[in-house]
Image: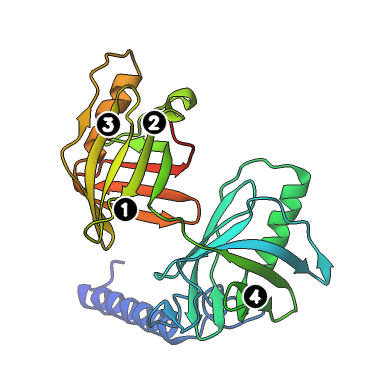
Amino acid sequence: MPRPMGMQKHRIISVTAIAFLALAACGTESGSGAGSGSGPGSRVGPEDSGGPAVSTDLPLTDVHWTVEGLSVDGKKSGVPAGAGLEIGKDGQASFQTGCNHSGAKVKISGDTITVGEAPSTAMSCSNQLDAYEADFGKAFAGELKAQMADGNKGMTLTAADGDTITLTSEPSAALVGTWTLATLKGDSKAGVKVPRAVADKVSITFAESGTDAGTGTARGNLGCNRFSTTTKVSGSTVTFGRVTTTRMACGEPQMTVEREMQQVLKGKVTYKLNHAGLSLTAADGASLTARPGARS
């Protein structure tokens, strides 16, 4: 027999109320999974505690740190050439392990670094590099204590279980000098495929003029023609003057590279230096990266 409409309505309201109360109970219950900050093996990520990502007087950020030593479970791990660590002021850490590149969000408070999850690229490496990456991933996790040494040129990170990472800092390169093209993205907004033989020929040499502070010159090779221009450095920008070039005609891809290079070397450009590289980014997004190189 069909139930009266009033009884059906009462049943629906009751079920809805029970579901609402169950959800409310779930919302107030302390969790025990990842990110909840409780339970065995849980790790509190740096995003869990709020506040600024970096709050410290120690010179930890915006420095390229080279890994000099790694000890895990009381045993030294072989450190490959090129292994390094960088931590930005935004709390983003990146590390090179000799094969893969990884990153993690970190929280720095005083001498304590709390490391979140660290996703990595998945390139196949040699057994030695695989072993190093596994050891580094174990040591660079959870809560670490940073101890500076050698006038802040050295640093040791120590985990609660005694694992340690020993690092030394590498100073940023100076803008003045010669740079060889590494990557290029012009006004097409797509990366330009530059053959190594062409990239090795493309160079920029910055020099100071010796007159007004920040003024200087830039000259080099655009891929086909040589160029020269004036420069004015202020803060994190360099302003290029009118670029003059020789007038040779070349084939491809040299002429494409040359056109894209001129898109970068136009007007006020933002530059950034690290321990072994230079990046230039124009207002329209055209950009390049370069490595220290011999003068062409």
x, y (%) of residue 267? Answer: 17, 45
Packing grade of label 4 (10 A; few <14, some 14-19, many >=20) is: many
Q: Tell me whether circle 2 and circle 4 mark residues in contact (CB < 8 Å).
A: no
Q: Tell me whether circle 1 and circle 4 mark residues in contact (CB < 8 Å).
A: no
Residue 227's tag is: 3
C-alpha gap between disc 1 and disc 2: 18 Å
Q: Is residue 160 left or right of residue 245?
A: right
Q: Amino acid at mark 4?
A: Leu
Packing grade of label 3 (10 A; few <14, some 14-19, many >=20) is: some
Q: Label 2, on which residue?
A: 202
Q: Label 4, on which residue?
A: 157
Q: Amino acid at mark 1?
A: Tyr
218 or 139, nearer to the observer: 218
| Residue at horizontal 58 percent and vertical 83 percent from the top | 38
Q: Earlier in the sequence, mark 3 or mark 2?
A: 2
Q: Earlier in the sequence, mark 1 or mark 3?
A: 3
Q: Label 1, on which residue?
A: 271
Q: Earlier in the sequence, mark 1 or mark 4?
A: 4
Q: Nearer the viewer, mark 3 or mark 4?
A: 3
C-alpha gap between disc 1 and disc 4: 31 Å
C-alpha gap between disc 1 and disc 3: 19 Å
Q: Quadrant of the C terminus?
A: top left
Q: Nearer the viewer, mark 1 or mark 4?
A: 1
Q: Earlier in the sequence, mark 1 or mark 2?
A: 2
C-alpha gap between disc 3 and disc 2: 11 Å
